[in-house]
Amino acid sequence: CSERLPGGGPGVSPGGRERSRRPRAPPRRGPGPAGTRALRPGPAPAQALPLVCARSYYLKESKGSRRWLLFLEGGWYCFNRENCDTRYDTMRRLMSSREWPATRVGTGILSSQPEENPHWWNANMVFIPYCSSDVWSGASSKSEKNEYAFMGALIIQEVIKELVGKGLSTAKVLLLAGSSAGGTGVLLNVDRVAEQLEEMGYQGIQVRGLADSGWFLDNKQYRRTDCIDTITCAPTEAIRRGIRYWNGIVPERCKLQFKEGEEWNCFFGYKIYPTLRCPVFVVQWLFDEAQLTVDNVHLTGQPVQEGQWLYIQNLGRELRNTLKDVTASFAPACLSHEIITRNHWTDIQVKGTSLPRALHCWDRSLHESNKNGKAPLKGCPIHLIDSCPWPHCNPSCPTIRDQFTGQEMNVIQFLMHMGFDVQKMAQQQGLEPSKLLGMLSSGRCMLIPMARSHLCTHTLPHSCTLMIRFFISEGEVAMVCLVHYSTSVIWGTFASPDSGAEGSPEGQHLPRESRSTAGSQPTATARHLP
């Protein structure tokens, strides 16, 4: 990466500073980007991917396999001189290749162990480290005006050229995968890679994309802050500034959808996806930690405020809506970030299907229908989106760790961490905590932080005969439960115990004994939950 690439100056790393200009020994001749050196790694572990082309990429060949997996690493970005300087000082491995190890061990979908990677373990694996800090979009070499070079898009092109001479030319399938910024990089580059191979005469290679945790929303922040650094800057503003600073390029088909100067829209998955020609599988947590970070929702260990909790739940709904027309998707209702290179990636399930299984089904559907997976195989789902409404309501979600202690938390501990005492609420209603969690996970109940009285109105399908029952705990949390009951929908007003007058609907708990709601709306009898 810190070696010279086309358009770069001597000793310039994409996204890195120009280093010393002292004379160096001539580079070893051989295939590869100009100025790179062949590296002869020593014996490596079975899963290790040796750094084949120094300061370029890691490759683990699988003789006889015609499947190739190219992985784009993630790691945020920088969008001006100040935060790029900070990034260089604090996260240098993401801006320079000088300290990259000679080998890397592949995990998750990059693992060569069938137990960890059931369907891609024997593919040719390529890991392209992220050192361009431009969401894999830049095409800018170092200049007198800019001390940094941003060449993410060019790095991918050069690696493709290099790999053609190493067996990619005979490939049947090329899966361009990536996580976080690398996942967004997949969306920005998958069509370009397919076009590059076609222009090189390799029309027979099926190019596909796998975007993990790179499907961000350009939504309104929970609390608006000035655009000072990567963390506090709203995603739209950060990308607006970045695309100019990086000289970023986006796919032409997406670019044509927007006015000149609005190409930044193509960095957001739901806007670029409809313009893509290559099939893409989208993996996205419904409550992505990176999305919450840029939205200024910081879970610091203090009980969440009502506005935060409602914002988090609404984020899940918004993200779910953007995925409804995505042919192949896997979206668990978990609070996390990145998954496909984690060694526990096989454990996560949506509706009883694991991610490796869903990818295998997608692979089969593309092979058998060759129509972008629009005819999924029976019993082999590829459109998997959780419907439960709050973070970690999916029991297969990865373990959460306390940000301060580092200790693992189960679901009950996590909810207490968020300000909800599930055990106490369950005890008040005569339920086991596990049963209450099941009701929450199934969507039959919702948790709503409360500080004041609220009007709760639910419009439900006419065919669905449901009853709404309210519980209030500690005057802070309301649990709204929907249970099957032979009645029409009712409307209720509820509040904390100390708000409202005694005897009024606003000021009372709905007790466990039977009680009817007042008013002109249809009424129903409240009773114990089954």
Image (tube, rainbow, N blue to C red):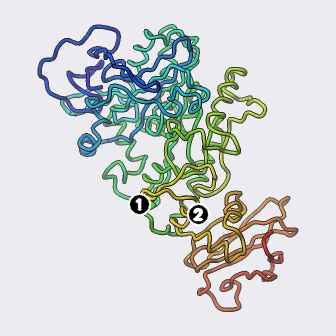
Residue wearing tag 2: 412
Q: Residue at x 49, y 56 (%)?
A: 408
The image quadrant that residue 3 belongs to is top left
Q: Residue at x 52, y 38 (%)?
A: 343
The local crowd at label 2, few if under 14, some if 14 to 19, many if 20 or more residues have their Cα within 10 Å, is: some
Secondary structure under the numbered disc 1 in the rendered image: loop
- For the image, the number of numbered tags is 2
Rendering quarter of residue 165: top left
Q: Which mark is residue 96?
A: none
View extreme (bottom): residue:
502
Q: Which mark is residue 405?
A: 1
Q: Amino acid at mark 1?
A: Thr
* x then y, percent, for residue 430: 72, 75
Which x, y percent locates residue 307?
Answer: 52, 67
Coordinates of residue 342 in the picture (x, y in percent): 50, 39
Image-quadrant location for residue 136: top left
Q: CA distance from mark 1 to mark 2?
A: 17 Å
Residue drawn where x is 83% and y is 75% of the image: 522
Q: Which amino acid is tagged 2?
A: Ile
The residue sitting at the left extreme is 22
